[in-house]
């Protein structure tokens, strides 16, 4: 039984390739869904969401003539890409409503959605198809309205905002923050990282030029040494309450690391980040070598000793920790790649079988650990490990960071042999990682870790044989040798209405899952009208975040930072400062953000129209809810679509996600891996 | 718990011809017999200043005025005031200290708030630090150091000796810019400054507040000399054995008559602090002559004490004979050989300072001891009363005493007024405070304090208003005030007691902070997170009762000798009238008042307090666009409590309720919203009050 992600895939004129992608994904995951109609739709019809007046047939059957000339012309042009789809564009066909009380037909409906990995999963619903396909298609449209496209507008007479929008509003000023990240001047960023030697020599500092940094390094060093020498204690944090700035220190002589942040993380989270940075340094040097370098030479300049790659890696890690969506650290878990149980078992069996066959080539003790990773997020697909041994999460996170950077730098090397120290495993020595990139398209990587530094050729040979074996298996080759990244699942695959995104962490497995990160490009399309855009935004620094949206890559980053901000707020809401994991063993916390978000109010004033009478988004009504549910078994973080303020529905969706995760636990998480 | 307190002005050390030590205005170590060297002190203030500069440079934000440095087992809390001065407090977080260990660690937020309060109370009484700068000599006037010693050291020393003070006011203390308003469950309830209501009510004659307005403030004899009258209700939970939540709700400012008083928060918080620290408010407390006695006894300091001249003039408590560290700069500049000697002297100064403060009490106590020795009669304090002139025949009658204790026989009179004994210094006749009625610079006003049982009334007069020195005028004012407050009891408290049984808000408690600058009010029914048992235990551990008893005896002595019936000295129930037996009876009667919070143990309460502070701090740190977006949270804790919090640009609402107490179908109606999930009673309440 295969799960069908959404009926609209079948009816909406999807390209064959896209349909195939969805089909392949679900066949690999093996999720089961019996419902023909999207679950999202059914709840949408049965619950009151947002502005209830909009749920009535009367209110849905609004005149198609738009009050705004810009959009009315698009609406009449028959579904151009720049049309402004919304509930108000839908015409109600009363006959087709009879079963569900409310069913909607559409004249012009364009859904243009992108998945962050670049593959288009868009539904193009043509005018004719939508009118002919009847009830199911109409239901799809309503379901799609849950993922609707428009930033909701208010304050415009005659124009009603959609009931629910999945445009994630930027309520944390993330755009501004993103812009500041590009400014290297000290004091302009929300976050900065300082790595110094105990003698006060700068080793690595993320932002700031030498002139600013060197005196500062001296002060940081003095502060730490003062407390250590005079008061026999260590400074842990400096917290400035009014402005919410936090300085967290880690003194691991001969290395001192400090993080500055005003992003609102708790001390505990920042301490984990410090530890992660320190672990990276150890992973390249080992604690033994580090001590040796500084022995009798406390003034040693480690900054010049580090290779360019190390600096790049440090930059990458700092960037991950400050302005990218990287839940691994705050969750202290690894992302797993959901996969059908039988396929994963087959992969594990193939590996074990090959290991048995090559027992002479790879004698016991040669291979310590093996991993099969998929996707640019380095999701774990398979694990090979000796009985009774596991690697620490943060050690693996370090390794994954290296692989991610390899993807980002577009390095085309197919094989790598890297000595790497896993500090939590053994901080004094190196292990050796054989990394083989099976497919750059699907971002599949095979990793073997060995304690023997001359094991490269053995592992290479073993890897080649194993790869051949895996590729020969049709079902496995779909995972590891695809020409595109098809891993993961979408939020639509779960019958959890109104949920925009979620993260589920299984504490037992120390793994988490989340749906593929999707974002709308509709907002970008609106802004493609350069005349409107330029005339209203030129020279206004306050609207820097909107300028970013012009660049799709920046928009993608902005979207990810928005997600990161939401999850950070959710996570902070249950964390204590002093390192306890959560306020209580079991906590359920709902957060509701509401208000009217105004972008560039100073520019627009109260008038949302430009001189031509056209509209651009000036104010957005916010009604967005999030939830954290933490128990000794799991943690669930979720963010709803904008416009949702019904706690009951969210609780119900959260329970559905939970049930879904528990039901498919064996597919979602790697249980034991291949044990040899 | 507390390690040291320091106040310094780094700008002084950076000036030419000045030395580093010139920056130091105050340095006080708590409970230390041997103080640290000047170099150590300078190093400490240097590092505080250094960290401050570092954070400013890296953060690029100059608007900061609070910092908390967390060390392994210490906290250094610093506030930056008047763009020039640092006030820093170092606290040991090590639980193995010799001072009473509270159930849980006290969050740093509470220390920060108290640091602000100590500064603001100083402003209220003495003005800004800058006002002490001697422009001609370009140096700080020595008076500043004297006053800092008198005020700041006393403030923090009381906390050092009685750490429960920090958490006795509950969560209110976190908002040091806001003041608690009293709420009563009657239709006649009014908000302070809300003149609109009173104008409506003038249609009926003789409302209690209109009496105050008409007969005192607008009276032709008083106008415009009396600027404002502030009426506070300060009931004591410990004494009353009633629902803590209701006591908390009714605690605070009941009424004042002008909206111009800008530092109303500081004035109110000062009174609340005095009340919670000492358990009552008396003339000695208001004048600042009453402090807790140091427990540390060492032979050296004892000998020093014995050599001090003993005087019963309370003026001596204003540190005229005191030696503080910074005033002894000369001795500190001596050769290093002499430094150790100087340090030994310094270490005893704090003891001597406190000793001097409490000299009048010690004197009276010694007198009793002496009397006991010479007459061969046991010198127990219970016998003390039989040797001193009696209050009145009625008051020694046990029946009447019980009546008095229960409030059936009201006690009232001036605490601070020119009616006080001539033997007492001026500070007992009028209390001069820096108040701001015009949003410009603070001006000094004379204040009189009057009480009626648990009600405290402050009469704020201009300094030029001489009428207050007229005894007949004061006696008339006493009558008018009595009449008005009696009316208040009739109008408000009686109605309140009738409605007590039907009170609907027993299963939840709330705090509402109005953040608008012109209001800044706190309405709260969340009691402090300490059980009465713990308060009693800790109080008895720390401070022996003879201190208080002797003071009461002194008051009676002075009152009767002066033959002045209005010279009553402590509001509410006098210390001596509390009887354990009576308390037990009263507690049994009021058992029905227990709320869900009173059922929790000390550990749970303390944990809950810290969790709520964490939640509050978390929402405070929220990075949302605070001007445009409101945030609300509903947290279900596994101890069965639901915590709702909503923060908008102008208001913060916190509601706690017991989830287990909710009926199954109670919240079904409102489950869609976060507030509605708290149950029907909360929804009903919110419709009326939010």
Image: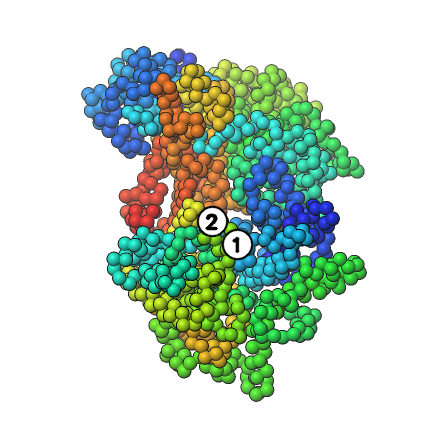
First in sequence, mark 2 or 1: give its number: 1
Instruction: Tell me the residue at 29%/22% (across/down).
Output: A88
- Gap between marks 2 and 1, in whole Å? 16 Å
Which dot marks residue A419?
A: none
Relative to B373, does residue B124 appear above or below in the rendering?
A: above
Q: Closest to the observer: B576 or A379?
A: B576
Residue A307 x/y as whole percent? 70, 25
Relative to B430, does residue A392 appear above or below in the rendering?
A: above
Residue tagged by mark 2?
B439
10 Å crowding of disc 1: few (<14), some (14-19), many (20+): many
Residue A443 x/y as whole percent? 53, 20
Instruction: Tell me the residue at 50%/68% (across/down).
Output: B428
Disc nearest the viewer among 2 and 1: 2
Q: Chain of mark 2?
A: B
**How many numbered discs?**
2
Q: Is residue B308 left or right of residue B389?
A: right
Residue tagged by mark 1?
B120
Q: Quadrant of residue A666?
A: top left
């Amino acid at each position: 039984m295969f799960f069908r992600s959404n009926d609209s895939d079948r009816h909406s004129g999807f390209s064959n390739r896209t349909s195939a992608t969805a089909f392949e994904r679900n066949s690999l995951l093996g999720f089961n869904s019996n419902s023909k109609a999207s679950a999202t739709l059914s709840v949408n019809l049965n619950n009151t969401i947002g502005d209830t007046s909009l749920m009535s047939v009367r209110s849905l059957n609004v005149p198609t003539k738009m009050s705004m000339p810009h959009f009315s012309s698009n609406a009449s042009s028959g579904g151009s890409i720049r049309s402004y789809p919304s509930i108000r564009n839908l015409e109600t066909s009363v006959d087709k409503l009879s079963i569900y009380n409310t069913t909607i037909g559409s004249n012009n409906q364009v859904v243009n959605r992108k998945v962050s990995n670049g593959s288009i999963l868009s539904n193009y619903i043509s005018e004719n198809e939508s009118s002919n396909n009847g009830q199911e298609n109409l239901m799809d449209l309503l379901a799609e309205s849950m993922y609707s496209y428009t930033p909701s507008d208010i304050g415009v007479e005659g124009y009603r905002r959609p009931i629910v929008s999945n445009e994630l509003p930027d309520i944390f000023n993330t755009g501004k923050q993103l812009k500041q990240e590009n400014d290297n001047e000290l004091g302009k960023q929300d976050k900065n990282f300082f790595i110094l030697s105990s003698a006060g020599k700068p080793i690595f500092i993320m932002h700031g030029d030498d002139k600013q940094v060197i005196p500062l390094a001296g002060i940081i060093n003095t502060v730490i040494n003062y407390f250590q020498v005079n008061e026999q204690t260590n400074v842990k944090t400096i917290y400035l309450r009014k402005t919410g700035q936090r300085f967290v220190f880690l003194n691991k002589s001969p290395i001192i690391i400090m993080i500055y942040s005003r992003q609102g993380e708790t001390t505990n989270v920042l301490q984990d980040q410090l530890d992660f940075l320190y672990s990276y340094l150890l992973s390249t040097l080992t604690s033994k070598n580090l001590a040796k370098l500084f022995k009798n030479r406390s003034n040693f300049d480690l900054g010049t000793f580090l290779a360019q790659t190390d600096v790049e890696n440090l930059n990458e890690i700092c960037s991950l920790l400050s302005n990218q969506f990287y839940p691994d650290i705050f969750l202290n878990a690894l992302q797993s790649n959901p996969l059908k149980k039988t396929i994963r078992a087959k992969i594990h069996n193939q590996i074990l079988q090959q290991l048995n066959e090559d027992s002479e080539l790879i004698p016991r003790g040669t291979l310590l650990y093996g991993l099969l990773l998929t996707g640019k997020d380095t999701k774990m697909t398979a694990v090979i490990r000796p009985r009774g041994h596991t690697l620490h999460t943060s050690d693996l996170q370090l390794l994954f960071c290296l692989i991610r950077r390899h993807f980002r730098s577009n390095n085309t090397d197919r094989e790598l042999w890297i000595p790497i120290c896993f500090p939590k495993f053994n901080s004094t020595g190196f292990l050796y990682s054989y990394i083989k990139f099976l497919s750059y398209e699907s971002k599949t990587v095979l990793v073997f870790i060995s304690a023997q530094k001359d094991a490269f050729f053995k592992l290479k040979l073993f890897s080649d044989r194993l790869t051949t074996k895996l590729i020969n298996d049709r079902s496995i080759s779909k995972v590891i040798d695809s020409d595109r990244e098809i891993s993961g699942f979408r939020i639509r695959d779960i019958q959890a209405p109104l949920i925009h995104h979620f993260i589920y962490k299984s504490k037992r497995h120390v793994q988490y899952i989340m749906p593929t990160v999707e974002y709308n490009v509709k907002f970008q399309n609106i802004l493609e009208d350069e005349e409107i855009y330029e005339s209203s935004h030129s020279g206004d620094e306050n609207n820097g975040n909107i300028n970013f949206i012009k660049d799709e890559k920046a928009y993608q980053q902005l979207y990810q930072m928005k997600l990161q901000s939401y999850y950070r707020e959710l996570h902070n809401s249950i964390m204590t400062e002093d390192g306890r994991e959560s306020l209580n063993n079991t906590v359920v916390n709902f957060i509701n953000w509401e208000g009217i978000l105004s972008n560039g109010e100073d520019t627009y004033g109260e008038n949302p129209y430009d001189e031509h009478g056209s509209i651009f988004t000036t104010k957005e009504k916010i009604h967005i809810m999030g939830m954290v549910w933490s128990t000794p078994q799991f943690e669930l973080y979720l963010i709803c679509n904008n416009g949702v303020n019904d706690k009951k529905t969210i609780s119900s969706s959260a329970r559905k996600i939970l049930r879904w995760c528990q039901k498919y636990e064996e597919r979602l998480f790697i249980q034991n891996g291949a044990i040899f | 718990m507390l390690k040291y307190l320091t106040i310094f002005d780094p700008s002084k050390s950076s000036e030419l011809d000045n030395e580093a030590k010139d920056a130091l205005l105050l340095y006080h170590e708590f409970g230390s017999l041997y103080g640290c060297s000047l170099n150590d002190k300078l190093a400490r203030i240097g590092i505080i200043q250094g960290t401050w500069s570092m954070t400013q440079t890296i953060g690029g934000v100059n608007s900061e005025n609070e910092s908390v440095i967390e060390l392994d087992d210490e906290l250094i809390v610093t506030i930056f005031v008047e763009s020039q001065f640092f006030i820093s407090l170092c606290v040991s977080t090590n639980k193995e200290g010799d001072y009473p260990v509270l159930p849980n660690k006290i969050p740093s937020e509470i220390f920060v708030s108290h640091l602000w309060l100590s500064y603001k109370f100083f402003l209220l009484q003495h003005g800004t630090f800058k006002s002490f700068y001697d422009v001609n000599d370009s140096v700080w006037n020595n008076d500043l150091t004297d006053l800092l010693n008198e005020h700041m050291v006393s403030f923090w020393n009381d906390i050092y000796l009685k750490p429960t003070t920090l958490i006795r006011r509950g969560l209110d203390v976190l908002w040091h810019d806001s003041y608690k308003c009293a709420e009563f469950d009657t239709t006649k309830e009014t908000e302070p400054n809300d003149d609109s209501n009173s104008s409506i009510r003038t249609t009926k004659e003789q409302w209690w507040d209109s009496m105050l307005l008409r007969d005192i403030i607008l009276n032709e004899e008083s106008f415009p000399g009396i600027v404002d009258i502030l009426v506070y209700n300060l009931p004591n939970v410990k004494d009353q054995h009633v629902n803590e939540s209701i006591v908390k709700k009714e605690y605070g400012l009941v009424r004042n008559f002008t909206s111009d008083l800008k530092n109303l928060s500081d004035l109110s918080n000062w009174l609340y602090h005095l009340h919670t620290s000492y358990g009552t408010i008396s003339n000695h407390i208001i004048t600042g002559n009453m402090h807790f006695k140091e427990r540390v006894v060492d032979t050296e300091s004892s000998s020093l004490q014995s050599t001090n001249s003993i005087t019963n003039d309370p003026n001596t408590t204003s540190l005229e004979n005191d030696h503080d560290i910074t005033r002894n700069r000369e001795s500190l500049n001596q050769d290093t050989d002499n430094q150790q000697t100087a340090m030994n002297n310094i270490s005893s100064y704090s003891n001597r300072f406190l000793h001097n403060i409490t000299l009048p009490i010690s004197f009276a106590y010694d007198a009793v001891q002496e009397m006991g020795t010479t007459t061969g009669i046991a010198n127990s304090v219970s016998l003390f009363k039989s040797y001193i002139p009696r209050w009145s025949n009625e008051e020694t009658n046990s029946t009447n005493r019980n009546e008095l204790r229960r409030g059936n026989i009201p006690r009232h009179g001036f605490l601070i007024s020119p009616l006080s004994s001539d033997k007492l210094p001026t500070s007992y006749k009028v209390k001069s405070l820096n108040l701001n009625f015009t949003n410009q610079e603070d001006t000094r006003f004379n204040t009189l304090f009057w009480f009626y049982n648990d009600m405290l009334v402050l009469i704020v007069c201009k300094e030029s208003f001489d009428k207050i020195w007229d005894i007949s005028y004061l006696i008339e004012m006493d009558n008018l005030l009595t009449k008005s407050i009696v009316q208040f009891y009739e109008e408000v408290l009686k109605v309140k007691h009738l409605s007590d049984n039907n009170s609907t808000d027993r299963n939840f408690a709330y705090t509402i902070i109005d953040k608008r600058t012109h209001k800044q009010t706190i309405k709260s029914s969340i009691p402090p997170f300490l059980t009465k048992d713990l308060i009693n235990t800790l109080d008895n551990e720390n401070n022996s009762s003879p201190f208080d008893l002797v003071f009461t005896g002194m008051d009676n002595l002075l009152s009767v000798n002066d033959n002045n019936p209005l010279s009553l000295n402590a509001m509410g129930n006098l210390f001596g009238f509390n009887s354990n037996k009576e308390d037990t009876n009263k507690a049994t009667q009021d058992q029905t008042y227990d709320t869900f919070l009173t059922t929790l143990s000390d550990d749970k309460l303390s944990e809950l307090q810290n969790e709520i502070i964490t939640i509050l701090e978390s929402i405070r740190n929220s990075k949302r666009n605070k001007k445009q977006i409101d945030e609300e949270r509903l947290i279900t804790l596994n101890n069965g409590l639901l915590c709702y919090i909503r923060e908008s640009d102008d208001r913060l609402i916190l509601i706690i309720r017991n989830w287990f107490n909710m009926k199954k179908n109670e919240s079904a109606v409102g489950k869609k919203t976060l507030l509605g999930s708290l149950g029907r009673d909360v929804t009903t309440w919110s419709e009326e009050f939010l």
